[in-house]
Image: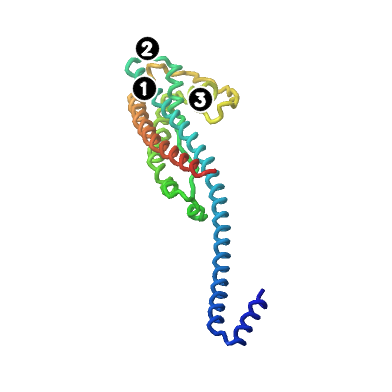
Amino acid sequence: MISFFRRIRQSLMRQNRFQRYFMYALGEILLVVLGILIALQIDNWNELRKDREVEQAVLLQLQEDFRSNLAQLNQKIQIRMAIIESSLYILDATDHPEVADRDSLIARFSILLVDPTFDPITFDLSSTGNLRLLSNNKLKRLLSNWTSDIVAVQEIEQNWSDIVNEQLQPELNQLVVTRDLGNYFANDLEADWQLEEASQRKKIPIGTAREPVSATQISESKVLEGLVSIAITYNNAANIQSETVRKRIEEILSLIESGMH
């Protein structure tokens, strides 16, 4: 092909047809440039195709991770609702100690010690370069802000966790009901918010306190009354923040699914 074009150029020069030679040379240059542009476009198409394949893989992983985050968040919301319900029961027993039931109080305090914490899967797509591959700008923005979205929930959870470990548990220890709480938690606590619903829990014969305090002694504790009230405040606040996070997760999942094919 190159020799063919060369013969044409030499023939035109021998015939002194400089104008035709010039036009031919210009056409040859344009043809070469066009070939380069076509090759570059094909290369760009190939790169774009590869990027879209990576994007689909990233979206699939994100969908799996955010579904897991949503399931965990829903579980934590249920735990906090159980804590709030148990706290209200304990406060009612505090207001009416004459009808308080010891076993029921032990059961309710066991739930308060569950101490839920939301530990979602986090992402750093920027460091891998995969964030730029996402074609939906709104999704990129939401993913970039994901870590900051969950901070409010985790801060409230940490505050409540500190109260449980530093105040509630020591106060229950002073009342000498720790053995009863451990026995109930290990053998009797059942809830639909447990991590493994289908798992069979082995009974552990911890037993109850040898000299158990009465329901009246438990319900009349002013310190516990205050801590139980705080339990309602913190866990309700955490659930309010969790509802915001849940809406954000649902929005992210919707955007992910709209970009998958």
- Give the secondary structure at mark 3: loop
Q: Nearer the viewer, mark 3 or mark 1?
A: 3
Instruction: From the top left corner, tell me how far across and down residue 96 is, in percent.
Output: 33, 15
Contact? badges 3 and 1 (CB < 8 Å): no
Instruction: From the top left corner, tell me how far across and down residue 201 is, in percent.
Output: 59, 25
Residue pointed to by mark 3 = 192
Real-space Cα distance between discs 2 and 1? 15 Å
Q: Residue flagged by tag 3: what amino acid is it?
A: Asp
- Give the secondary structure at mark 1: helix
**Disc on the earlier residue, 2 or 1:** 1
**Disc on the earlier residue, 2 or 3:** 2
Q: Which of marks 2 and 1 is in front?
A: 1
Real-space Cα distance between discs 2 and 3? 28 Å
Residue pointed to by mark 1 = 88
Q: Are there few (<14), some (14-19), or many (20+) residues within 10 Å of tag 3?
A: few
Q: Residue flagged by tag 2: what amino acid is it?
A: Val
Instruction: Name the residue at 50% across, 19% down.
Output: 210
Residue pointed to by mark 2 = 99
